[in-house]
Image: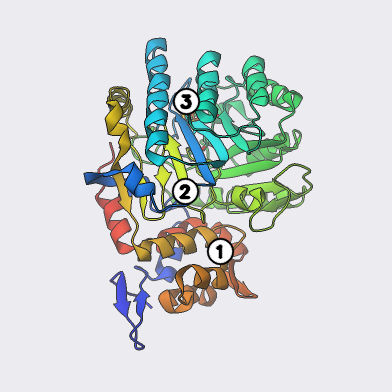
Amino acid sequence: MITTQNTQSNTSGNTTRGINQNLSSKIAQSPYQAYVYSYPHKTAYRPLNPAISLSKLWEKQDKQSLFLYIHIPFCEMRCGFCNLFTTVSHNEDFVTQYVRTVQRQAQRVKLALGDISFARLAIGGGTPTQLPIQHLETIFNIASETMGANLSEIPISVEVSPETATTDKLKLLRERGVDRISIGVQSFIEKEVLATQRRQTTAQVEAALGRIKEAGFPTLNIDLIYGLPGQNVDTWLQSIRATLRFQPEEIYLYPLYVRPLTGLGRTDKEWDDTRLACYRQGRSLLLSSGYTQVSMRMFQLKKQSNSFSSSSPSSPSSQHSQLSTPNSPLYCCQADGMLGLGCGARSYTDGLHYSNEYAVGSKEIRDILQAYIQTPDESFDYAHYGFKLDADEQRRRFILLSLLSDEGLNYASYFQRYASDVNEDFPELTELFSLNLATQDEQVLRLNETGIERSDTIGAWLFSEKVQQMMDNYELK
Ligand SMILES: C[S@@+](CC[C@H](N)C(=O)[O-])C[C@H]1O[C@@H](n2cnc3c(N)ncnc32)[C@H](O)[C@@H]1O
Ligand code: SF4
């Protein structure tokens, strides 16, 4: 059914929630239209007037198993493809002030939220290990002493880059209980990486991976990108084979997305075909090498002896196996309750997602960071910028994030949460069957192989008209 409105009445008088665009017309377009990793996207956030007090906002939220995310927006270089909230132009003094500001923010947020406890911690960026070691230590102290996270009990994930994964920093991470390291490699072919203005040698990558293995983290994740300039299916498979030599517990295969202001630019059918061929062959190679596919991008080694090996719905694995984002790694989509600290971090309650303002251009990022370190203490008691999720948006989020992971959309779980039938609320979901993109098994709707490779299209199709419009109207800075 094609609807042009978000919400309309069906014959039984119930409210049904329309999906904007016919899926078949979207599927006929490029599979690479938007990277759908969370909902709603940050470009749908807007200033909140008036600002919302955090103590009120979190009052009714379950605060006993929150996900703490700390954002470190610094990198040794700005890769040509990257649109994350991060900067290279910083001096030591600025970095010190940044860490002090995270500390100030943490104190106010803790005071506003009161009795909280954390089920997991992720430190992402940017590149957290770009921080000098004493600041990295302060970040862990903020998590444990200020926020009260029990670091020895909870899963902790940290993003690193090859050059900054030094022995002393890895040792600190291990001592502070980090059990998952995620490293951006992108490609083992030097000239492909250099073509994206990422200064990185393969020797550096291999040395870093050696150090990480040596340090003994239970989970190593390696990020690779396909669709890079000069890359073809053969060189792509070479990179995957090189990755497999390190037997990482997880591998992310990212299709290269180029967006305005990120330095690389290309949009043509040939590029789509190359990316699709790389995806298919990369996927086959991983499936035949002992990995299972968790989502379009994420692959997990089957035989794991660490804490992420179980797959029961409440286990860390199922949280772990949800969609992740480059700058907000590994988030359990269905359990809202993410608390973000640092500039660029998002926080999620059921009804409001909030963060700082967003930008990609380097000057704008610097201005936002400057404003962050000048934020008066009392201003941290409020959410100033975000998106309010009404009942319809909350349902969409649930559907979108479950459908795009291997867990699939469980009709009973939907009913339990929302006391209504998902197929009545979103009758358009049947289009997934008619287009041969999904199957239904014991009341769980799952994307099939074709559906998974079209995840980004299907995700964008599920956006509400309102979110789509806000994203379209967003002026990228
Ligand atoms: C925060 S970085 C990982 C850690 C570290 N900063 C690094 O680059 O080594 C997140 C990952 O997102 C992926 N990524 C970022 N922008 C992308 C884009 N435009 N297209 C595809 N992948 C992208 C890259 O694979 C990158 O490793
Ligand atoms: S890919 Fe990683 S190192 Fe490169 S700019 Fe983005 S966050 Fe920084």
Residue 218: image location, x then y, percent: 72, 35
Assign a secondary structure to mark 2. loop
Q: Earlier in the sequence, mark 3 or mark 2?
A: 3
Residue 363: image location, x then y, percent: 29, 25
Q: Nearer the viewer, residue 446 or 28?
A: 446
Assign a secondary structure to mark 3. loop
Give the farthest residue toward the bottom.
11
Residue 23: image location, x then y, percent: 43, 69
Q: Which residue is mark 1?
A: 451
Q: Tell me the distance, in whole angstroms, between the alpha carbons under discs 3 and 1.
A: 33 Å
Q: Which residue is mark 2?
A: 337
Q: Is mark 2 within 8 Å of ligand 1?
A: no
Q: How many marks?
A: 3
Question: Looking at the picture, which amino acid does disc 3 mark?
Answer: Gln
Question: Looking at the picture, which amino acid does disc 1 mark?
Answer: Gly
91 sits left or right of 331 in the view: left
Q: Earlier in the sequence, mark 2 or mark 1?
A: 2
Q: Earlier in the sequence, mark 3 or mark 1?
A: 3
Q: Which residue is mark 3?
A: 197
Query: Are there few (<14), some (14-19), or many (20+) residues within 10 Å of tag 2?
Result: many
Residue 38: image location, x then y, percent: 45, 51
Look at the picture and state if 295 lies above or below 358: below
Look at the picture and state if 331 lies above or below 413: above
Decide if residue 282 is in sight here: no
Question: Looking at the picture, which amino acid does disc 2 mark?
Answer: Gly
Cβ–Cβ below 8 Å for labels 3 and 2? no
Residue found at x 36% / y 65%: 391
Q: State the quadrant of the C terminus.
A: top left
Question: Which of the 4 image quadrants contains residue 8?
Answer: bottom left
Q: Is mark 3 within 8 Å of ligand 2?
A: no
